[in-house]
Every structure is written in structure tokens, then in C-alpha cells.
Amino acid sequence: MVEDEPKVAALIKKGLEENGFNVDIAYDGFVAYKMFEAREYDAIILDINLPYKNGIELCRDIRSINPRVPILMLTAMGTTEDKITGLDSGADDYLVKPFEFRELLARMKSLLRRSTNTISGGNNLKFLDLEMNLDTYEVMRGSTKIELTQKEFALLEYLLRNKGRVLSRIDIAEKIWDITFDTGTNVIDVYINFLRKKIDKDFSPKLIHTQTGIGYVLKEGKS
Ligand code: CA
């Protein structure tokens, strides 16, 4: 956990340890990165406002060497734009401060469960020239290797397992984020756009399609 407020850090550490987690704390972004390089962590809780290197920069740095470790970002800023900046830097999920501890615990468990489930899945998913290896996490579009974050990977896996079927935003929210989003939330659209940039933008045919008013579908098509 990377959090510069000692009281908040101590409280979260205590709560997580009572629930069976082992927690290391870094109080600034510089030390956090050194720790991340030195040890293998199952998940990272990352505050945004940090000394020396903020959470957004740190998240980008971590992603550049590890695209898959689950990252939960803590943000005091509540605007949609800030959330998108956090997610765009590679975080898998975010929590807006102040939050209840049980909310943080639920998000952590969900992120960890998903990363373990994906590892034990043990096969290949394929649609046209898009291929996803659930053992190695390798994603290929044709001969191009695609780097996805853990959340993007989970979303693409869900689309691939349901190819040809329209998935509503609610389906996706429940399956990938384990929660029912308020109707105003655009996180799913943001993630779909991340995926489109990576697997569709430079390729043909386009695979991810919008079903207006409902959600998204993976299929062959022009637009
Ligand atoms: Ca802070």
C-alpha cells in the first residue's frame, strides 16, 4: 500500500491484516517504486497525492514493468476526469476517499479473485485473428502482440467468451467489477475505449461494436 498519511495507512494495514493479508506500506512514490522492483506483490493500493512521485506517475511506471498486477487507486478527487486519468494510467479500479473499509476490502478481494481465476482458466480464446492465451496472458491481434492491463484483459475475456452476444453495461459491471453501477457511471465505456484503441484502432475488421442503448458486442463488422 502506498499512502503518505500514516494514520490512514496504519488503519488500512490493520484492517487488511485482520483479514489475512500481508501488507507493506510505502509513504512516498519513490520508495514505493523501489519496493515494487525488489519484491513481487499480489496487488497494489495506490494513493494519488504522494510526495516525490504521484500515484498517476507511479502507476504508469509500475505498468511499464508489470502490466498485470492488480492496482486499486485511492483518490480524493471526485470528478470523472480524475477517475479517467487514474484508469488511463493503468489502474484496474478506484475508490474515492472517504470510503468505508469494507468497500476497500471487497474491491481488493474482487481484484485478487479475478487475477487468480484468470490464471487457472487454462486455455485459449480466439475470434478471427484475435487470440488470448489464459495461461500466459498473451493477447495477439494477427501477428501484433497487445499489452493489456488486468481489467482490460478481464473485459476482453468476457467479450470473447460471449462473442456474437450483446452484453449490457449491467452485465459487464456485475461480471467484471462485481458491482451494479449507477446509471451515470461511464467506467465501462471508458474501458471499452481503451480496448478499442489497443485491439481495433489499427486493425480491420473492427471487432468491438456498440449496440446503441444496450451495451457492447464482439463481432465482425466495419464500424
Ligand atoms: Ca495522500
Image (tube, rainbow, N blue to C red):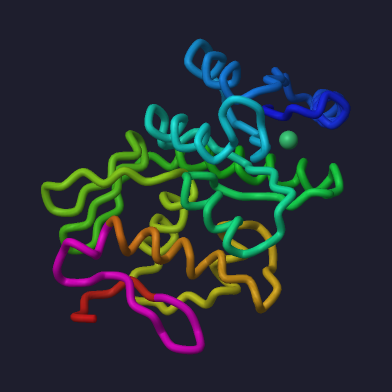
Percent across and percent down for residue 152 are 43, 52
Locate the C terminus by quadrant. Answer: bottom left
Residue at horizontal 30 percent and vertical 53 percent from the top: 125
Q: Residue furthest left?
A: 143
Where, by quadrant of the figure, is residue 2 drawn?
top right
Q: Could you say which is closer to the camera, residue 3 or residue 208? A: 3
Q: Which residues are magenta?
A: 199-216
Image check: 133 left or right of 40? left
Percent across and percent down for residue 143 are 11, 47
Q: Could you say which is closer to the camera, residue 30 or residue 204? A: 30
Image check: 218 left or right of 177? left
Q: Could you say which is closer to the camera, residue 51 or residue 40? A: 51
Query: Residue 155, relative to residue 183: is it above or below?
Result: above
Query: Residue 1, relative to residue 149: is it above or below?
Result: above
Where, by quadrant of the figure, is residue 6 drawn?
top right
Query: Residue 20, relative to residue 39: is it above or below?
Result: below
Where, by quadrant of the figure, is residue 174 drawn?
bottom right
Residue at horizontal 47 percent and vertical 30 percent from the top: 62
Query: Residue 42, relative to residue 127: is it above or below?
Result: above
Quadrant location, ligand no. 1: top right
Residue at horizontal 40 percent and vertical 55 percent from the top: 157
Q: Could you say which is closer to the camera, residue 58 or residue 11? A: 58
Percent across and percent down for residue 167 are 47, 75
Image check: 158 left or right of 185? left
Residue at horizontal 68 percent and vertical 27 percent from the top: 1
Image check: 126 left or right of 53? left
